[in-house]
Structures are given as C-alpha cells and as structure tokens.
Image (tube, rainbow, N blue to C red):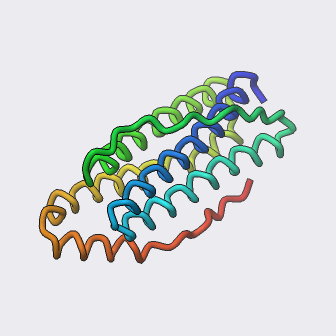
Amino acid sequence: MDRKVAELLNEQINKEFYSAYLYLEFANYYAAEGLDGFENWYKVQAQEERDHAMLFYQYLQNSSEKVTLEAIAKPDCQLTDHMAPLKAGLKHEQYVTELINTIYAAAFDVRDFRTMQLLDWFVKEQGEEEKNAADLITKMELYGSDAKGLYMLNSELGARVYTAPSLVL
C-alpha cells in the first residue's frame, strides 16, 4: 500500500474515534436537557463512528499495514441550545466527507483500486450522514419551538436502533 494512503487511513481511524467522542458529548448534552430520544440518536451515532474506525483499523491490518493509534482530543464545542449540537453535527459530517474524499483522491492517484472500493462505501455513507444531519436541523426548525412537536421528534429519535455495517474487507 502506498505510504501516503496508509497514513491517511491511519489518521482517519483517529478522526472516526473523535467523531464518536463528539457524538457522545452531544448525547450528554441532550441527557442533561431531558431529551432522551436525542440522547439515544447520538449514542447510536457514536456507535456507528466507532465501527467506522474499526473498519479502517481492520482494513489496514488485513493489508499488513501498521495501525498507529493516537490520542483522541476532547470535543471542543459550545452547546448552548437544542439546535447547537445538530448544526455542529452537520458541520462535522461535512468535514468527515472532505477527509474521505482526500483519502479517495490519494488512492486514485496511485491506482489503489482496493482502497477505492473500500472508500466507495464510505462515500455513500457520508452522503447519508449529511442528509440525516440536515434533516434533523429541518425537523428541529419546524417542530422544535413547539413543546408537542419537540416531544414527538424526541420520541421519533428515541426509536432509532443501531445496525452494524455489513462491509466485507
């Protein structure tokens, strides 16, 4: 595997674990606010991110590449109202999309088709992640200022369950 591609994949492991920390921070915020559905949604989101990190981890190991784990930074975000985590979540997903695209471009440059095939799944996943984040913002804008609407949205988010990715490495 190309050295630069391997380095970027290693860095992505750390970024995915950071994403999990960030979403746990959001879950903490919503738990303190009494919005257990929002808390659940972000706990599920955190589990997805941990699994994404492990997919990159396993891919590198399967490719006989050394995995280097780095320290995970504490989330740095100001959660001042119910909308703040949602907007920060969308911004973060857009950032992760850029990271995935950067790895894809590096793999493309060296004709690393196997890594590109792995990343195809992540490109699709990021499209879904950004849409989900944007949809949450839209729903909060529509219903969040109404107590009954917020209750219904909270109930909807509380029904989310985690489904592990079925990606063959």
- Percent coordinates x, y for residue 84 in the rendering: 29, 46
Q: Nearer the viewer, residue 57 or 100?
A: 57
| In-image side of 123 versus 148 (left or right) | right
Residue 37, quarter of picture: bottom left
| In-image side of 71 versus 40 (left or right) | right
| In-image side of 138 versus 52 (left or right) | left
Q: Residue at x 21, y 57 (%)?
A: 138
Residue 70, quarter of picture: top right
- Percent coordinates x, y for residue 100 in the rendering: 53, 37
Q: Nearer the viewer, residue 141 or 118?
A: 141
- Percent coordinates x, y for residue 78 in the rendering: 34, 39
- Percent coordinates x, y for residue 137 in the rendering: 25, 54
Q: Nearer the viewer, residue 49 or 36?
A: 36
The answer to whether residue 153 is above or below residue 80 is below
Q: Residue at x 28, y 58 (%)?
A: 135
Number of labels in the image equals 0
Q: Residue at x 65, y 29 (%)?
A: 8
Q: Residue at x 46, y 33 (%)?
A: 98
Quadrant position of the N terminus in the picture:
top right
Q: Residue furthest right?
A: 64
Q: Residue furthest front?
A: 32
Residue 7, quarter of picture: top right
Q: Nearer the viewer, residue 134 or 1?
A: 134
